[in-house]
Amino acid sequence: MDFNFTEEQNMIRDSLSRLIREQYDFDTRRKVVESEAGWRPEMWAQFAELGLLMAPFSEEDGGLGGGPIDAMVVMEEFGKGLVVEPYVPSVVCGGGFLKRGTDAQKEEYLSGIMSGENVFAFAYAEPRGRYNLADLETTAKKDGAGYVLNGHKAVVIGAPWATHFVVTARTSGDRRDSKGVSVFVVAKDAQGVSTRDYPTVDGRRASEVYFENVSVGAEAVIGEVDNGLPLIETVTDEAIAAICAEACGAMKVAHAMTVEYSRQRKQFGVPIGKFQVLQHRMVDMFMEHEQSISMTYMATLKLDEDEVTRKKAASAAKVRIGQAGRFIGQEAVQIHGGMGMTDELAVGHYFKRLTMIDSEFGNIDHHLKRYTGLTEMDLPAAAE
Amino acid sequence: MNLDFSPEEIAFRNEVREFIRENYPKELEGIGSREDLTREEFLAWHKVLGKKGWSTPAWPEKYGGTGWTSTQRYIWSEENARVDALMPLPFGVSMVAPVIYTFGNEEQKARHLPGIRSGEVWWCQGYSEPGAGSDLASLKTTAVRDGDHYVLNGQKTWTTLAQHADWGFFLCRTDPTAKKPQEGISFILVDMNTPGIEVKPIKLIDGTHEVNETWLTDVRVPVENLVGTENEGWTYAKFLLAHERSGIAGVARSKRGVERLRNIASEELVDGKPLLQSQDFARKISQLEIDLTALEFTELRTLASEAAGKGPGPESSILKVKGTEIQQRLTELTLEAVGNYGAPYGYGMEGTGNDGFGVGPDHANFAAETYFNMRKTSIYGGSNEIQRNIISKMILGL
Ligand SMILES: Cc1cc2nc3c(=O)[nH]c(=O)nc-3n(C[C@H](O)[C@H](O)[C@H](O)COP(=O)(O)OP(=O)(O)OC[C@H]3O[C@@H](n4cnc5c(N)ncnc54)[C@H](O)[C@@H]3O)c2cc1C
Ligand SMILES: Cc1cc2nc3c(=O)[nH]c(=O)nc-3n(C[C@H](O)[C@H](O)[C@H](O)COP(=O)(O)OP(=O)(O)OC[C@H]3O[C@@H](n4cnc5c(N)ncnc54)[C@H](O)[C@@H]3O)c2cc1C
């Protein structure tokens, strides 16, 4: 057993944390969030230069030979800085699908993801599908050698900045069947693709994405036709591990800010940190954060294990982090008093991001159910 | 003890329901989920009620109260909540007015109470300061006597909706040499148009402009605007806080919120079935409803003891703590219910001309914003920690 980071991983953390400190302070972030574009392509280019966009990919694929742990290191720092650029949509999801694609697909798309030229968004959720990855009304009908896509994808994070989408669609079977799901890569400027773009409550951008008779060739299919769901779940579990790491970073800062504020803020002649009821609350926040780190490591390290183990680990982490994020976010605001409610202070923005992480890729209830469904619920022999 | 409405009470309920149906301003329908309302929108229903004589049911009759029993008042709030009515704001009707009719002089009553009843005059609350939040008695804003004026200097903050206010009630230090911080504070009514007052917006995390910083620089206020006795303001301030707290339970409104949540959960789907039919979620709604029932009966017991002549005591802290926890839980579950469509930001980014209003089903609009906003309820009106301190000290004797 080994919980140490490699030299490369430590280097990634150090250089990224310096970059965020120097160029991603809270005021700068605010300006970016409120700007028309909502992100900084030049920051994306710097991430590429630092090697972050290629870190988790194998050397064979042109990456730095890291893996999910590298993505975890990056995402924790992103969480601390409330970074809005689309690392999960493009690198973890887009890259996660394409590294499992054909050589031609890797050549066409993956190198662009690593260089930062291609920006991907993952269009999977639908207006009536909630968190069920197979509950798809978007269809892809066979048309000659290729397919024609029709449908509406909901709240596609990072879509306004994307050059390409990974799209899930039904190629056969009934709505919600686990068979009959396929995965496609579609250029955003393809004929028939349109978007409605908007900001999200946690400072990012998303779109409703509409596909109207969008024609793609057979080479647009990633993985097996009709059997895309296992691949989608694999990549989604990787994304879950990544946003759990992001949550850990955000929790760390929200907690540290709260402890610091409780030292500075005086009421009744003493720092409010002297009130035991607040001390215990901050101790609970600390414990929640520690448990979250543990669960993030656990889920990240089990991504390569068998399917059931991986799924249970990802769901367990997502449940625990959803709960911890809610507690830490709410208490951070509460202990800041009125100041915690202001847009001016960073702490409320950590609260908002932590809130939204719970509903990304399935919320607490969804993952408790998934976990329970994967657990043997046989009675012990004696009870029969 | 019994829980049934009498025939008279049922007749009253029908009368009220009818009146609301016929008179509730059409332009306010469905406005409830928005937080950034205009002055006119805030006051529209208040003005209708003012004309009818129903804007201030809790006041003594001689000042314009309706003389309703506590059961009638209960019916009144239930009926308003049924249509999500935008009720009169508390600052005039249930905060400053009770102070004025209890401690003010006849001239003050004649001057201020009518405008509060009619909804013509908007009041704001100038208590908190940057350095004086929970420890309100440490406030530093001064009022120095100069002939027949007080001259006010200092900074208030978190002043809710002061951008619309005509008048404010301010706590100021009139005797800086007093031995205890609670002594030497006065309760002063201030015309918000007086030179030297500057109101600056504070943006909250949900994007709304609901509170302000209020700066006072050499603001000259006639001495006749002092309420009660100089240096006795703390007594009035505490009296007002207890009133503020009892209104804060919000039972009828939360009941309506549960109903709305149920509607949302019956439209939202999980694996093709209504969310309401998922055991996990249905049980959360049940739990919330059970907690709300406990609060409702606690409030009814409190009202009964108030009717028996006991003013709101430290027990009102229970209503504040439990009431706000329920309101917060309600918005949390509403956000949970709308799933992915909690993310679009309804107010959008200034200057980009793009917002997330109307993305997804209507019931998802502002679900996250409202959840964020309602975190304020365990902070303001005396934080929930302070309420627990009050119970611990005043009831448990610790
Ligand atoms: C089953 C059992 C086994 C034990 N085994 C051992 C043992 O092997 N060795 C040994 O030395 N002792 C042992 N203890 C004793 C144990 O350490 C004491 O019970 C403990 O220290 C609490 O002391 P007390 O019972 O006097 O309660 P008190 O100290 O009187 O505490 C009463 C309550 O007040 C709270 N409280 C006290 N001080 C504070 C504070 N500063 N802030 C907040 N809350 C506070 C406590 O948490 C508790 O809820 C054992 C006790 C039990 C019940
Ligand atoms: C949206 C909003 C609207 C408001 N509207 C108004 C208004 O119209 N007029 C007005 O005058 N004020 C208003 N307030 C101010 C409100 O009353 C104060 O925010 C509140 O009193 C808390 O003060 P504070 O913000 O300075 O927090 P602090 O007092 O600094 O408290 C910070 C934290 O410390 C805790 N704490 C403090 N003392 C203790 C203690 N002794 N024991 C345990 N914990 C403690 C608090 O509970 C809180 O969690 C509003 C506030 C908000 C957020």
Image (tube, grey):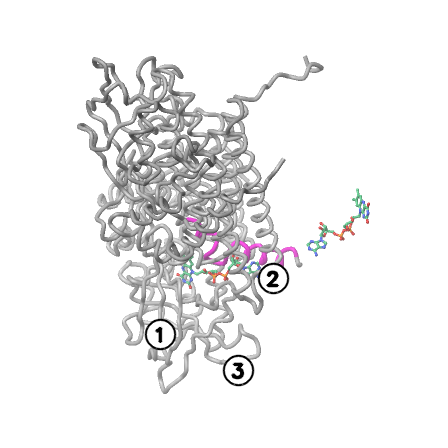
What's the residue type where badge 2 is placed?
Lys
Mark 3 touching mark 1, by CB under 8 A?
no
User: Badge 3 is on which residue?
Assistant: B177
Q: Mark 3: which secondary structure?
A: loop
- SS at badge 2: helix
Q: In what element is the residue under mark 1?
A: strand
Q: Which image quarter: residue B361?
A: top left
Asked if B315 appears above or below B283 in the picture, the reply is below
Q: Where does the magenta region start and end?
A: B374-396
Residue drawn at 26 percent across, 40 percent down:
A160
Is the distance from the Cβ of mark 1 to the nearest ligand 2 atom less than 8 Å? Answer: no
Nearer mark to the viewer, of 2 and 1: 2
How far separated are the C-alphas under marks 3 and 2? 28 Å
Quadrant of res B224: bottom left
Determine which residue is flagged by label 1.
B216
Q: What residue would you read off at disc 2?
A: A274
Alpha-carbon span between mark 2 and mark 1? 32 Å
